[in-house]
Image (cartoon, rainbow, N blue to C red):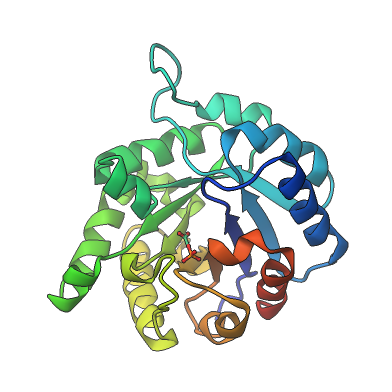
Amino acid sequence: MTTRDKLIVGNWKMHGNHAANADLLQGILAARPFVAQAAVCVPFPYLSEAAVALANSGVNWGAQDVSAHEQGAYTGEVSAAMLHEFGCRYAIVGHSERRALHGESDQLVADKAKAALARGITPIVCVGETLAQRDAGETEAVVKRQLSAVIHTLAHCIGEIVVAYEPVWAIGTGRTATPEQAQAVHAVLRAQLAAASAHASSMKLLYGGSVKPDNAATLMSQPDIDGALVGGAALKAADFVAIIRAAA
Ligand code: PGA
């Protein structure tokens, strides 16, 4: 069996300010060393301060989105080349909030993942079903369709991405998937990746959706859950650190 290092990623969403960010990052840094890998995905304007605060700390930083385009007349977009200049390690793509609120299609998400990889940034590709889709028994079909676009677009590079399974009904709701529900979907995703890549067994599959200090360890003890994508609990240093430690 392959052992995969655990990875905990904080998704700050549209939260923060200079003072709060400095406190949060200091709180995380003060708790090192960590056994698990850790990263924070911050709003674009704060990338440079994250880069300065986290330089050589072992904690990585990333963005929450990236343009599918290389450069050009795309007002408001941020390219992978720009992120690369900040030493950005990760870019979340296809978060359900962007799929739902900004109409991002499976193909656009795949194109964003490709743009990130082309600049050496690891895309964290989010997939997940809504409650209506789960109730209709469509969970597997939905996540497979979302991942399939990425598999086809990235072809032999698919092994270089991180996948995050985030059931939409669990995001920000305090309602977590049970470890068994999450594991079942992770197993489906890993099997789908295995059909496309020889590296599937070493790829990281994160779970996201109301991960908290008190449920993190059981979720991450599942065989195919290699870490967490954390929203709300990533805004409090003590909680985020507790989740990083729960991964060890
Ligand atoms: P949550 O968010 O931990 O607040 O549920 C997770 C996410 O949206 O990535």
For the view shown, which residue lies furthest in the top direction? 73
Foreground: 88 or 52?
Answer: 52
Across and down, in percent, residue 112 comes to 40, 37
Q: Quadrant of residue 34?
A: bottom right
Residue visible at 64% across and 52% down?
A: 40
Residue visible at 40% across and 24% down?
A: 69
Task: Classify residue 87 as left or right of residue 33.
Answer: left
Across and down, in percent, residue 2 comes to 57, 76
- Establish if 243 lies above or below 50: below
Q: Is residue 130 visible?
A: yes
Across and down, in percent, residue 176 comes to 42, 78
- Where does the C terminus fall, quadrant-wise? bottom right
- Establish if 50 lies above or below 132: above
Q: Quadrant of residue 108?
A: top left
Task: Classify residue 84 as left or right of residue 165.
Answer: right
Foreground: 189 or 30?
Answer: 30
Q: Is residue 152 visible?
A: no
Across and down, in percent, residue 147 comes to 30, 56
